[in-house]
Image (spheres, grey):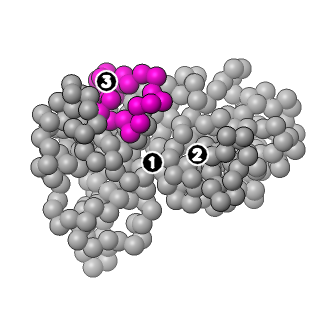
């Protein structure tokens, strides 16, 4: 039997999704979402062989609003649709499994995820907002990015391209071609009590992403909004394929896996 789980997590206290040790055991000094979930499921279902497979290898500090994971078990002592409820007392508050179910035969969360939407959140100000620490990127500048320039630059990334310039490590990339279906920027006013700031949200939907790809896209679009790159410069990065031609890599705390799209749905 294959069971799939849908979860949300705050990645601030985790070393990413994937267990760090090559042997597969969790390092207590480097807790991961996968390792924490493995431990809870093994305790609940009395099966030490359980190992969850995730739809994405999110980095340390990255969050998820809609993440899919799956695991195999011979026979579950807990009905698949009740596992999400039974896991509540076994998981920290930073991880919530909000849905569980028996998956179609042969389902694998990694290979049956056909599309993902990420969002990246940041704000620009001279002074930081402590309540947003770990949840948004604080860009220390009084300048306000031009959202129309950001969206014009974002439109240059749509379609199927070689995204070599947007990969933090090409060594493990079998192919650098990806398809971006949506890339847009919006902003939302936030009342801080004494003032209002604009919270910028970048949304990117694609069939897959290279290492640090969304964070590099976010840094590049910020540069476009601040006038450090033109939309034409952004288009040129796809032709030049050089990492140095794109913008900076935005930090992890503003990144969220917002939605996954499964082959069977």
Q: Measure the C-alpha gap from mark 2 to mark 1.
A: 13 Å
Q: Is residue 236 above or below residue 21?
A: above
Q: Quadrant of the C terminus?
A: top right
Mark 2 vs mark 1: which is more N-terminal?
A: 2
Magenta span contains residue 108 = no
**SS under mark 1:** strand
N-terminal-most mark, 3 or 1: 3
Can the viewer see residue 183 in this picture?
no
Give the residue displayed 38% in from the left and 59% down from the top.
136
Left or right: 88 with respect to 137?
right
- Which residues make up the magenta segment? 158-180
Q: Is residue 38 above or below residue 90?
A: above
Q: Residue furthest bottom?
A: 194
Q: Which type of secondary structure does the marked residue at label 3 adopt? A: strand
Dot label at residue 162: 3
Q: Position of residue 70 (x, y in %)?
A: 67, 34
Query: Which residue does the numbered mark 1 point to in the structure image?
Result: 256
Mark 2, residue position: 17
Residue 45 visible in rendering: yes
Q: Is residue 164 magenta?
A: yes
Could you say which is closer to the camera, residue 79 or residue 231? 231
Identified at 48% across, 39% down, the residue is 259
Around disc 2, counting alpha carbons within 10 Å, would you say few (fewer than 14), some (14 to 19), or many (20 or more)?
many
């Amino acid at each position: 039997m294959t069971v799939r789980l849908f979860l949300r997590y705050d990645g601030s206290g985790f070393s990413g999704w994937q267990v760090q040790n090559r042997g597969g055991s969790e390092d207590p000094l480097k807790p991961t979402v996968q390792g924490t979930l493995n431990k809870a499921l093994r305790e609940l279902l009395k099966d030490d062989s359980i190992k969850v497979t995730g739809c994405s290898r999110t980095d340390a500090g990255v969050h998820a609003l809609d993440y899919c994971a799956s695991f195999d078990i011979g026979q579950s002592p807990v009905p698949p649709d009740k596992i999400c409820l039974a896991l509540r007392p076994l998981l920290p508050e930073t991880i919530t499994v909000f849905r569980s179910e028996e998956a179609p035969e042969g389902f694998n969360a990694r290979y049956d995820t056909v599309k993902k939407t990420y969002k990246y959140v940041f704000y620009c100000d001279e002074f930081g907002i402590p309540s947003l620490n770990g949840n948004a990127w604080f860009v220390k500048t009084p300048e306000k990015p031009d959202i129309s320039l950001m969206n014009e630059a974002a439109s240059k990334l749509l379609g199927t391209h070689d995204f070599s310039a947007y990969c933090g490590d090409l060594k493990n990339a079998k192919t650098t071609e990806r398809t971006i279906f949506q890339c847009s920027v919006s902003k939302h006013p936030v009342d801080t009590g004494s003032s209002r700031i604009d919270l910028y949200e970048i949304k990117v939907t694609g069939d897959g992403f290279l290492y640090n790809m969304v964070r590099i896209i976010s840094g590049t679009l910020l540069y476009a909004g601040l006038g450090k790159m033109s939309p034409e410069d952004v288009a040129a990065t796809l032709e030049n394929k050089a990492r140095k031609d794109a913008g900076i890599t935005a930090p992890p705390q503003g990144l969220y896996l917002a939605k996954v799209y499964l082959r069977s749905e």
